[in-house]
Amino acid sequence: MQIVASPVYNLCPEKWNSIIPNNHKTFFFKILLILNFFANSTLISAYSFSTSYSMPLLQTLSSGPLKVAVIGSGNWGSVIGKIVASNAKTSYIFDENVRIWVYEELIEGKKLTEIFNQKHENVKYLPGVPLPENLTAHSSLKDTIRDANLLVFVIPHQFLKSTCETIKAFNFNFTNTKAISLVKGLYIDNNNNPKLSSELISEILGLDCSVLSGANVAKDVAKEEFSEATIGFDDKESADVWQQLFDKPYFKITGVPDISGVEVCGALKNVIALAAGFCDGMDMGSNTKAAIIRQGFEELRLFSTLFYNGTLEDTFFDSAGIADTITTCFGGRNLRCAAEFVKSKGTKSWSQIESEFLNGQKLQGTLTCYDLFKIITSKSLEQLFPLFTVTYKIAYEGMSSDELINEFKVKKLRRIKSYDDCTLCVLPAIFKDKKKENGINYPKCNS
Amino acid sequence: MQIVASPVYNLCPEKWNSIIPNNHKTFFFKILLILNFFANSTLISAYSFSTSYSMPLLQTLSSGPLKVAVIGSGNWGSVIGKIVASNAKTSYIFDENVRIWVYEELIEGKKLTEIFNQKHENVKYLPGVPLPENLTAHSSLKDTIRDANLLVFVIPHQFLKSTCETIKAFNFNFTNTKAISLVKGLYIDNNNNPKLSSELISEILGLDCSVLSGANVAKDVAKEEFSEATIGFDDKESADVWQQLFDKPYFKITGVPDISGVEVCGALKNVIALAAGFCDGMDMGSNTKAAIIRQGFEELRLFSTLFYNGTLEDTFFDSAGIADTITTCFGGRNLRCAAEFVKSKGTKSWSQIESEFLNGQKLQGTLTCYDLFKIITSKSLEQLFPLFTVTYKIAYEGMSSDELINEFKVKKLRRIKSYDDCTLCVLPAIFKDKKKENGINYPKCNS
């Protein structure tokens, strides 16, 4: 739904900077919030009214606008830096100066950070895309995040833990700091339980950590093609702030109170994409590929519900859910490499395919598939995750790709679901009147 | 999930016909049911055990095996005839002779029904696919359905009402008859409320009517490529019978107790495919197309929940839900014609495109879009269905296709969902123990 108005945003904050003197900013902000509350008295508006800043954020804001640090500057990190810096420039809530941590390297003898700050472009990882001038690159992680109120983690999965530990050693005071993770992937703890990137960040740094995930091919978001993303949050105030920071007309943000659901989607969709790629490699028709994706998504949903409390159906219908899975299963590196893996009929290893297709970068899907299988087998859950299991065996145990289909092409009948096994759709309260007006009491089983 | 065993099926019924004398069949059947009950005593098996025939069916079976009639013999009807006849031949439950109603026409001076019954092929609508010899074509609707216990409706949407009224006029006794509808599309009643094909059949003929829908491109199912379909049912016994009739290793059937949900998916996915086709016609990237499909699916879900009681989330995760929507949005006639409509920039009408691409056959998506918009506007629900509304305006009111994206590419923030707006995922009871063993109480909001 998008019948939603953020009153603060609509008032064109870019204009205030010139109008309002700095020391009046916080006072003005409070007045606006009060005004907004009264402005939103109609039913639809009340439904739309999402911005309820509680004291902690206002307290932080009393000392000035919120400072943002982006940790990571690869392809996606640079795009996110662009979005965040563009919003910070025009929003009263955020400090205009956004810092981004760049792993220092030399490009034709010159430091990447220097090129970045002179040309306002990440020539290595996002060439050709102009970045806002208020986004500055720093090679020191410590300098990047010093005093930051909002930490945006967007680094490769395998570096997250060590980066968090480095940050912890800085001994910064994080009382007024929140984090968000854009890191995709799954970790395993010592008991072979899944661990999510937000868990890792929360545990090591003691931060409230939201997550952002969605159907976002980086280069297309960089070109400002329309796309969407989902924020999974624990605390409503965090979601509101992150939405203000990330939302652009071409990058629409929704929020669901389901961190683990959003993260499980972001990690496991890559395993589904491997299976979909196997289908492509075998030249399967659309019925078959759709069935495999559906089975994968059902296992993803079961995984989230089984391992985490409070998984929401709404998460799966959001951008992080079906939309991202669709994008990943009809394009993207996991799909292409998996198709090549099958076509090569065992003559090419994953690392060979990675070096041919990805310049040696690692595939996320195969790593996640490996860890996922470890979790599944350690708990003897293979029966509940037949697609994930067979995908692992094809990817790692030399099983023929035909088994992907044979696993399901069986005589055994599937279970007919009873009403008690199923989840009833819930209408948000605001729609209840519409339902009373228009609901049809048919058929019997549905009454 | 497919950890499911139908005990009856597994016992290879094709062998019984030769072993068991006819008059002992019903007795044998009862004994088998009792044996099955005891055979399924382990936890997973108990979960799998779905076949619980209550008295009415057994009563009908006392008089002999169930007689099947397929009403309709187009592309999909012929494929369904093939499946049904193949299962009827080997199952003890069904009469071997399956009748299919063929609208009589002359092919090179010879009657289509005669060619059908001689060549065992529908040379007009499914050429090249051998059909079982126990599937016989009849030009008389009355002869086709006489004495039938199971009526399979698989005719074009626009002929359903008149066909039902013709059948009603036969004045047959339908006490022991059940129906299933494979008809896709939406009807409107006099109050501009949606009406589904199963409603129409139930109302006119007073029959219990289930539905079947799924990601099924007919020609690929005909080639026995692996696919899946969903039965929406009211009465569990019906679902069990229909599953026995339709399930093949290459055509796996699941069931959900949600007739209206399954039908709404089957109808509205074609409207989403129009919007997806508009994206293709504008050469939009995958982020954008995924966002449009997601928005469409969310509106589909809202439509079902708003207009019908008891809509289940499980329906949307089944073949009739996301799988069928994916297939339809990445292939198929609605997608292709909608892309052509946009590319022609208003120079081609829908009927011109239909004649070029479909030999003059009507598109389902445009018809459904038209009716859907009538329902939406008559109830002033445009705000709740922005994608359906803009899709209609592009298709019928000359609106520029750019508006499809502009509608969503806005500054207004979307609503952050609260926990109360969302639907919690429910684990079937059988998984509860697994959950206790493996559930992780993270994060806070999810506990």
Image (spheres, coloured by chain):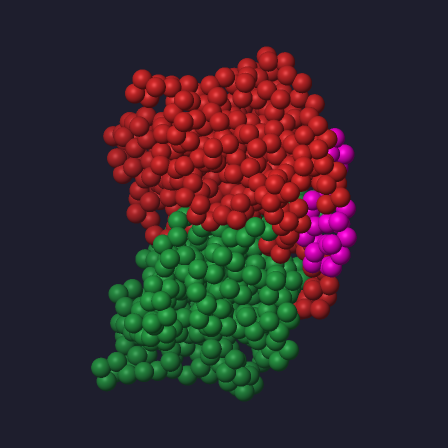
Chain colours: A green, B red
Residue B256 horizontal side relative to residue B116, left or right: right
Q: Tell me the magenta residue range.
A: B33-59
Please say whether residue A262 is visible from this viewpoint: no
Q: Nearer the viewer, residue B437 or B211?
A: B211
Q: Nearer the viewer, residue A216 or A330?
A: A330
Residue A28 falls in image quadrant: bottom right
Q: Nearer the viewer, residue A84 or B304?
A: B304
Residue at x-position 52% and y-position 18%: B141
Residue at x-position 35% and y-position 82%: A104
Residue at x-position 31% and y-position 42%: B281
Q: Residue furthest left?
A: A108
In the rendering, at what x and y percent does residue A309 appear? Answer: 67, 62
In the rendering, at what x and y percent does residue A422 appear? Answer: 66, 48
Residue B24 horizontal side relative to residue B160, left or right: right
On screen, residue A294 above or below A27: above
Residue A53 horizontal side relative to residue A86, left or right: right
In the rendering, at what x and y percent does residue A231 appear? Answer: 53, 59
Point out the image quarter for the C terminus of chain B: bottom right
